[in-house]
Amino acid sequence: MISLDTNVVLSALDNSDMQQARAQRAILQAAGRGLLLISPPVYAELRASEFWEGQIKPFLRSTGIRVAWEMPEALWERAGEALGRYARLRRAGQLPRRILADFLIAAHAEHHHLAVLTFDATVYRAVFPQVELLEP
């Protein structure tokens, strides 16, 4: 099973995004490997989009992409630990600033033994080395 990151879904649906074709191909290839899921943080980020009703919701429904809602306490603890470690690495080097949702997405994938299809593999790799990362 593969968890989709917000950036891949939004790129696949945005006609003005230069990475649209890459994102669409990657989603199709991922679907060939098995069930596609999104985590609750990805759902919330997608739900915040102005394109939710017109594009995103119909896309999720038509492709059968489901939300894996389970996020137990251990997952939240792992996300917090990873966020702290990432912040220390970022202050010591060149890593970009990230938000909590990124670490929840990766911790969710780690907890459920999912691969993550993302444009942010470098970020996740820094603190979630055991999570399988797929890049479009």
Image (cartoon, grey):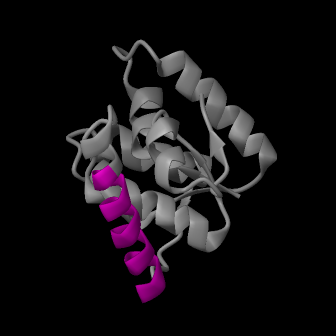
- Part of the protein shown in magenta: 72-88
From this view, report whether residue 49 is shown above or below residue 119. below
Q: Is residue 84 magenta?
A: yes
- Which residue is at 71% across, 58% downward? 1
Q: Is residue 101 magenta?
A: no
- Which residue is at 45% across, 79% downward? 71
Residue 70 located left or right of residue 103: right
- Which residue is at 39% across, 79% downward? 77
Residue 72 appearing in the image:
no
From this view, report whether residue 111 is shown above or below residue 16. below
- Which residue is at 37% across, 17% downward? 17
Residue 94 x/y as whole percent: 32, 31
Residue 92 x/y as whole percent: 29, 42
Residue 117 appearing in the image:
yes
Residue 30 x/y as whole percent: 70, 41
Residue at the front extreme of this rendering: 92
Q: Nearer the viewer, residue 26 or 93?
A: 93
